């Protein structure tokens, strides 16, 4: 078992997965016929003339996205209705037959480049307009459209797929050739990460509500992400059980109890996606979520070893709703206020502790009256290892105060602390007057802990 845990500790990300982790926070943009019909899922029979964003301004999108601190945009180039936001040569159900007469994918990608943020796209495998859906010929059709998007719009940072699969003409069911799609992306955009429920690069968190797990491991069983490359031998219990039940909605995915039964482990981190408002497409009657909810989603995602993909839907004019623009600006201001300037500290790793149970002493240069967060980052290029940890504060008089208990860390863990000045020392009953030292104590890890960064806010 010890050998297998060491193997698990050395499951490593690719360079493009590391680049994706550093993106952290980016925008989803759902736009299409549904914007005009008021629906969330179109049926593919919508007339092209419906789509007419008369004031389309993708630079306005990018400006609003950047105001929130996001570093990229993923555009729904085609949703389930099959309507293409670019003038595809393979269908008439596209912008080329709408009054718009603009290549929205081009407008968006060029606005992202002007604004200095990354661009990606979502191409729905389910196409309710395509006559060939449900046949082998549809995979050719899909690859043709995928090629158009991969070759006509510059560098792509993410290609986003879901697994929605409905009935085609005469009740036919489509078998998606995802390995073929992935090979095409690897050939034409080798630096792009691929999002799919089951890998290869990024997996779905299991909900669309901005909620993360208490322990969101990037190292998970291959039974869950079977498109990702396996990096270990089977677990010691693999011959005595099965993980065939695993799905993204499970509460425990990367825990020891699971991985021991795995046929092998992969590196497949989680993306947490949600919309800024109840629907994914724009609806006049809807309002953006509160700052509190958005901030909770940020802590659960960016602060929980995942990335946050926040949807902002353009309205019928082709602009972000002013209510959403305002909320994005407020959100960015909140994030900059909370995490803009770290408290000056010095960090040292104390001697005399086991490699899997290190203690980090954080000396605060100016004794603090207010401490709200400790942000931890493992060097995940070497693997994700920490299973559990705790944070305590020490006062100038030597009192110790427990502030946080956590599970895994990974790329980034934002620890929202108990207010140390509202706590009492469990032995003396005293409350601290000021905090001079914090300690991060790792209580369990799969191999020697390699901490990349510790910051205090």
Image (spheres, helix red, strand yellow):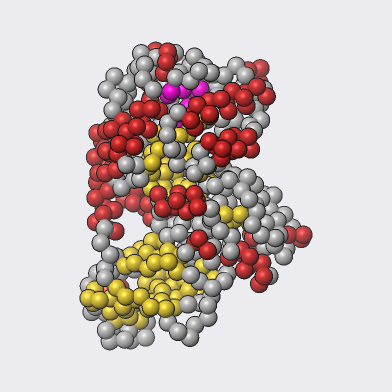
Locate residue 280 relative to residue 147 in the image: left or right: left
Position of the N terminus, as image quadrant, is bottom right
User: Within the magenta stretch, is there residue 83?
Assistant: yes
Q: Residue at image x 61%, y 54%?
A: 266
Tell me where the magenta segment starts and ends, as one range. 76-86
State yes or no: residue 229 in magenta: no
**Is residue 19 or residue 422 the one in the foreground?**
19
Q: Looking at the image, which residue is at 49% across and 14% down?
A: 92
Q: Could you tell me how many numbered marks the image carries?
A: 0
Q: At which x and y percent is residue 163?
A: 57, 36
Say if 235 sits above or below 34 in the image: below
Q: Position of residue 404 (x, y in %)?
A: 40, 69
Q: Measured along the vertical axis of the image, is residue 150 above or below residue 69?
A: above
Which image quarter holds the C terminus?
bottom left
In the depicted view, which residue is nearer to us: 254 or 267? 267
Main SS, magenta residues:
loop
Q: Tell me the quarter of the picture where residue 157 sits.
A: top left
Residue 403 x %, y %:
37, 72
Left-right relation of 413 to 61: right
Q: Is residue 72 left or right of residue 9?
A: left
Q: Nearer the viewer, residue 37 or 270?
A: 270
Q: Residue 429: tell me if it is visible.
A: no
Q: Residue at x 63, y 67 (%)?
A: 5
**Residue 60 seen in the current view:** yes
Q: Is residue 3 above or below residue 36?
A: below
**Image coords of residue 243 (percent x, y):** 68, 53
Look at 32% across and 42% down and name the residue there: 116
């Amino acid at each position: 078992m010890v050998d297998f845990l060491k193997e698990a500790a050395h499951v490593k990300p690719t360079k493009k997965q590391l680049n994706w982790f550093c993106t952290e926070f980016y925008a989803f943009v759902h736009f299409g016929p549904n914007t005009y019909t008021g629906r969330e899922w179109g049926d593919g029979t919508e007339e092209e003339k419906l789509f007419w964003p008369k004031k389309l301004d993708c630079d306005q999108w990018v400006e609003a996205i950047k105001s929130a601190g996001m570093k990229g945009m993923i555009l729904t180039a085609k949703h389930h209705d099959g309507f293409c936001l670019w003038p595809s040569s393979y269908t008439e159900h596209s912008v080329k037959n709408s009054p718009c007469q603009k290549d929205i994918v081009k407008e968006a990608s060029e606005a992202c480049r002007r604004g200095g943020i990354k661009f990606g796209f979502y191409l729905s495998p389910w196409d309710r307009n395509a006559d060939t859906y449900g046949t082998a010929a549809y995979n050719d059709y899909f690859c043709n459209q995928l090629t158009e998007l991969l070759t006509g719009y510059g560098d792509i940072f993410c290609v986003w797929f879901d697994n929605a699969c409905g009935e085609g003409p005469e009740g036919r069911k489509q078998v998606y050739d995802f390995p073929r799609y992935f090979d095409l992306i690897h050939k034409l955009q080798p630096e792009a990460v691929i999002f799919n429920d089951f890998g290869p690069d990024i997996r779905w968190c299991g909900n669309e509500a901005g909620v993360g797990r208490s322990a969101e491991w990037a190292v998970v069983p291959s039974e869950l992400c079977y498109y990702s490359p396996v990096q270990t031998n089977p677990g010691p219990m693999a011959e005595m059980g099965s993980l065939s039940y695993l799905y993204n909605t499970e509460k425990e995915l990367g825990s020891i109890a699971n991985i021991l039964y795995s046929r092998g482990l992969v590196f497949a981190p989680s993306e947490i996606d949600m919309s800024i408002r109840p629907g994914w497409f724009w609806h006049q009657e809807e309002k953006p979520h509160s700052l509190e909810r958005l901030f909770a989603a940020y802590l659960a995602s960016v602060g929980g070893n995942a990335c946050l993909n926040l949807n902002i839907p353009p309205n019928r004019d082709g602009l972000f709703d002013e209510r959403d623009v305002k909320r994005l600006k407020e959100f960015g201001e909140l994030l900059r206020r909370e995490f803009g300037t770290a408290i000056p500290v010095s960090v040292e790793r104390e001697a005399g502790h086991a490699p899997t149970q290190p203690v980090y002493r954080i000396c605060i240069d100016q004794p603090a009256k207010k401490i709200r967060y400790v942000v931890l980052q493992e060097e995940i290029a070497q693997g994700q290892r920490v299973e559990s940890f705790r944070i305590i504060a020490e006062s100038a008089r030597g009192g110790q105060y427990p502030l946080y208990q956590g599970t895994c860390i990974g790329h980034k863990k934002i620890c929202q602390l108990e207010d140390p000045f509202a706590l009492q020392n469990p032995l003396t009953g005293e409350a601290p007057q000021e905090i001079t030292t914090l300690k991060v104590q790792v209580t369990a890890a799969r191999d020697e802990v390699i901490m990349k960064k510790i910051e205090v806010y």
